[in-house]
Amino acid sequence: MTANPSVPGPRPDLAMHNDWFPSGWDHVLPRQGVALTMLIGTASQGFTGSLDELMQEAFDGHWDMIGGDLDGTLTFFWPDGQWHYEDEPAGREASEAARWDQFSTMLTKAGFPVPTTARDLAELYLAWGLAHREETQDGTRWSMPDTLPLPDDLLPLDAELTERIDGMRWSMRTGPLVNTLVDHLADDLGEPEETLTSLERLAAGTGQEVDDVRIALAELVESGEARLQRGEEPADAQRLEAHRRFRLVMDWQLFHDHHPKLHVVGQDPARA
């Protein structure tokens, strides 16, 4: 039976590699890196054909997020997006030029060509091991490794970029630990302003390891949202023995100021 070309088939669901954001590449590459990773990740889900063919099947050949098509010009900022002058006070053109200078210098030092299009960037993905491409009898097959190579293992990141990526990775490591601890304090204990506890008790209450509780407490203390006291003296979470009791004093107002709740439109706030 011949397929009716006027009736479009189902478009493939876009797939994002689980390791993309934790790896830090999002902080290194032009903005189209996210879209390209989604495109290659989608191609890796059993699609046979070129990235251009996938673009045609999924987006009728045009996708704004990737810059139109694979030959669109790479940029670090959305050309028509709202500009945040507080984050980039130098202005759009100056900030774009500075990011390109940083990116170009880094790639040149490492001996890689500087890409100007998403197609160029796809070739760098292959060189870096972020993606693999194989020509088979049925056509082109794309794949990605389970664990992505890290940008700091392949490129000479400057101090500012290294600090930014390290901070992001640490936040992704500690964020869930803090959330689990706070959920226990809020949902199980009713947001006490002060509680006499220990690392072992908190670990049992949260289902976490003692060392994970240490990290979560240290983050809350550093942010000013909590204090640890033994008697009249402040306590250091890193030095506390697991069984040793201390007073955990929470500043819930500051915590909620830092972490405002999101309410669904139309939802009763009292039931949020």
Image (cartoon, helix red, strand yellow):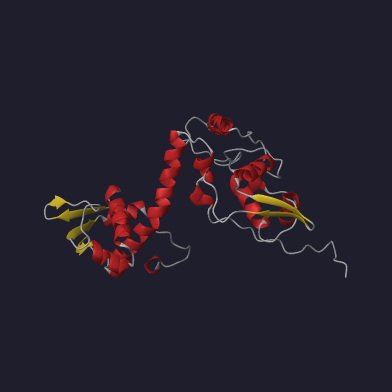
Up-down relation of residue 6 to residue 219 (above or below): below
Look at the picture and state if 72 lies above or below 42.
above
Q: Position of residue 251 (x, y in %)?
A: 25, 55
User: Horizontally, is 206 left or right of 13 in the view?
Assistant: left
Question: As drawn, is 102 to the left or to the right of 60?
Answer: left
* Quarter of the C terminus within the rendering: bottom left
Classify residue 96 by image quadrant: top right
Q: Between residue 86 and residue 197, name the one nearer to us.
A: 197
- Spot the residue most to the left: 232
Quarter of the image where the N terminus is located: bottom right
Residue 86 visible from this viewpoint = no
Q: Residue at x 72, y 50 (%)?
A: 51
Q: Is 88 left or right of 217, judged from the image as shown?
A: right
Q: Position of residue 266 (x, y in %)?
A: 47, 65
The residue depicted at 49 percent of the width and 41 percent of the height is 152
List x then y, in percent, for residue 13.
Answer: 65, 61
Decide: is 5 above or below 21: below
